[in-house]
C-alpha cells in the first residue's frame, strides 16, 4: 500500500490553514476589545473616546470588508451597523475635525491673527461640546456595547479554515484596486466628495495592510509610511472641507467666511498636491502585479 497522503483539511496543510484562521480571529477579537476599552474608559475625555471608538470601528469595518467572501451576509450586516454607529458620532467628530483644520491654518502665510484664531477656537470648542452632549448619550453607548457584544459572540462561529492566506491576500488586492480606481485624473479639479471617497478606501487599505503584515511578518505588501502619509494628507483635506462648510451662510462661522475661504483653499491646494505625489508612487503598480507580489511574499 502506498503512503497515505495528508488531507488538506486534516493534515499539515489543514493545520496551517486553521492556525492562520485562528490568528485572524484573534486579531478581530483585539479590535473588539480595543473598542470596548475606549467605550468603557471614563478617564478619557469625550473627544478622546470618540476618536478611539471611531478608529476601532474603522479597523473593524476594514476587517469585515477584507473577509466579506468567507463571512458572507453577516459581515455585510455588521459592517453596515458599524457604519451607522460611526455616523451617530459624526457631529462630535466633525467639530474636532474643524479644530484640527484651524490648527492647519496656522501654517498659512500670512497666518491668521491671534485674536481671530482664539475667537474661532472658542466657537468650535463650543460646537464640539454641544455635539458631544447631544449625540454621545447613554443610549448610544448601549447601542455600541450591544454591537460589540454581538460581534464577540459571532467571532466564535467564524470558519477559521476558510480564513486562509489566499483569501486575505485577495481581499487586500480588492481594496488596493478600489482605491487605485478612485485616483483623480486631474487632482487639482477633484472636489471634496471625490477626495473623501478616496480617503475612505485608503483608510481601509491602511488597516488591512497592517493586519496583513501582522499576520505575515515577512510579507511586504507596500510602503506603510507612504500609506499613512497619504491618509494624513487626505484627512487634512477632509478637515478643511468640514471647516469650509461651517463658513456657509447661516452656519456658525459665516461671519468669518470672507477671511477664511482663501486661506482654506490655499492650504487645501497644498495638501492635494502632496497627496497626488504620494498616491502616484503608492499605487503605481497594477492590481494584478500587486496580487502576484504579495502572493509570493505570503508564502515566505
Image (cartoon, rainbow, N blue to C red):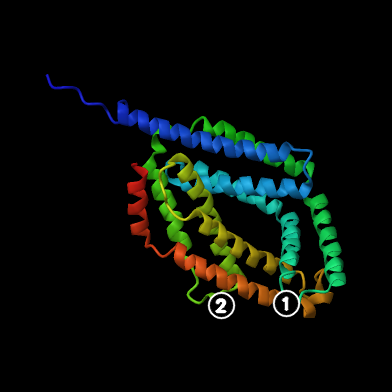
Q: Residues within 10 Å of mark 2 (few under 14, many from 20)?
A: few
In the image, 63: left or right of 83? left
Q: Secondary structure at mark 1?
A: loop
Question: Which label was assigned to residue 136?
Answer: none
Q: Residue at x 72, y 48 (%)?
A: 50
Task: Residue at 46%, 62% (x, y): give it.
Answer: 282
Left or right, 181 with respect to 249, comes to left
> In the displayed structure, would residue 261 be above or below residue 222?
below
Seen at 73% across and 70% down, the residue is 105
Q: CA distance from mark 2 to mark 1?
A: 20 Å
User: How far from the left and from the top, in percent, is residue 272?
Assistant: 58, 71
Quarter residue 78 falls in: top right
- The image shows residue 291 at horizontal and vertical percentages of 36, 53
- Which residue is labeled 2 in the image? 188
Asked if residue 197 is positioned above or below residue 133 in the image, the reply reads below
Residue 111 in the figure: left or right of residue 157:
right
Residue drawn at (64%, 72%) of the image: 268
Residue 161 picture location, percent across and down: 39, 33
On the image, numbered disc 1 is attached to which residue? Answer: 109
Q: Secondary structure at mark 2?
A: helix
Q: Which mark is first along the chain, 1 or 2?
A: 1
Residue furthest out toward the left? 1
Q: Nearer the viewer, mark 2 or mark 1?
A: 1
Looking at the image, can residue 117 be seen?
yes
Q: Is residue 217 above or below residue 152?
A: below
Q: Mark 1, residues whose alpha carbon is within 10 Å: few (<14), some, or many (≥20)?
A: few
Q: Position of residue 285 (x, y in %)?
A: 38, 62
Amino acid at each position: 500500500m502506498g503512503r497515505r497522503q495528508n488531507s488538506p483539511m486534516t493534515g499539515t496543510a489543514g493545520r496551517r490553514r486553521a492556525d492562520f484562521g485562528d490568528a485572524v480571529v484573534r486579531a478581530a477579537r483585539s479590535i473588539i476589545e480595543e473598542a470596548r476599552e475606549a467605550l468603557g474608559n471614563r478617564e478619557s475625555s469625550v473627544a478622546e473616546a470618540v476618536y478611539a471608538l471611531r478608529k476601532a470601528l474603522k479597523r473593524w469595518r476594514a476587517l469585515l470588508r477584507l473577509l466579506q467572501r468567507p463571512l458572507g451576509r453577516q459581515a455585510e450586516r455588521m459592517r453596515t451597523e458599524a457604519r451607522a454607529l460611526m455616523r451617530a458620532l459624526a457631529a462630535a467628530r466633525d467639530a474636532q475635525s474643524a479644530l484640527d483644520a484651524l490648527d492647519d491654518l496656522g501654517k498659512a502665510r500670512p497666518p491668521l491673527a491671534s485674536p481671530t484664531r482664539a475667537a474661532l477656537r472658542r466657537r468650535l470648542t463650543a460646537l464640539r461640546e454641544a455635539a458631544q452632549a447631544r449625540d454621545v448619550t447613554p443610549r448610544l453607548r448601549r447601542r455600541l456595547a450591544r454591537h460589540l457584544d454581538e460581534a464577540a459572540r459571532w467571532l466564535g462561529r467564524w470558519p477559521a479554515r476558510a480564513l486562509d492566506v489566499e483569501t486575505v491576500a485577495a481581499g487586500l488586492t480588492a481594496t488596493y484596486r478600489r482605491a487605485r480606481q478612485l485616483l483623480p485624473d486631474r487632482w487639482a479639479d477633484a472636489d471634496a466628495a471625490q477626495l473623501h471617497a478616496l480617503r475612505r478606501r485608503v483608510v481601509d487599505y491602511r488597516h488591512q495592510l497592517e493586519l496583513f503584515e501582522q499576520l505575515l511578518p515577512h510579507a511586504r505588501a507596500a510602503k506603510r509610511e507612504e500609506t499613512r502619509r497619504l491618509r494624513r494628507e487626505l484627512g487634512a483635506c477632509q478637515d478643511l472641507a468640514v471647516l469650509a462648510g461651517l463658513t456657509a451662510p447661516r452656519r456658525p462661522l459665516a461671519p468669518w467666511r470672507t477671511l477664511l475661504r482663501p486661506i482654506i483653499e490655499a492650504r487645501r491646494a497644498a495638501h492635494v498636491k502632496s497627496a497626488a505625489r504620494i498616491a502616484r508612487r503608492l499605487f503605481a503598480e497594477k492590481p494584478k502585479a500587486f496580487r502576484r507580489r504579495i502572493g509570493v511574499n505570503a508564502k515566505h
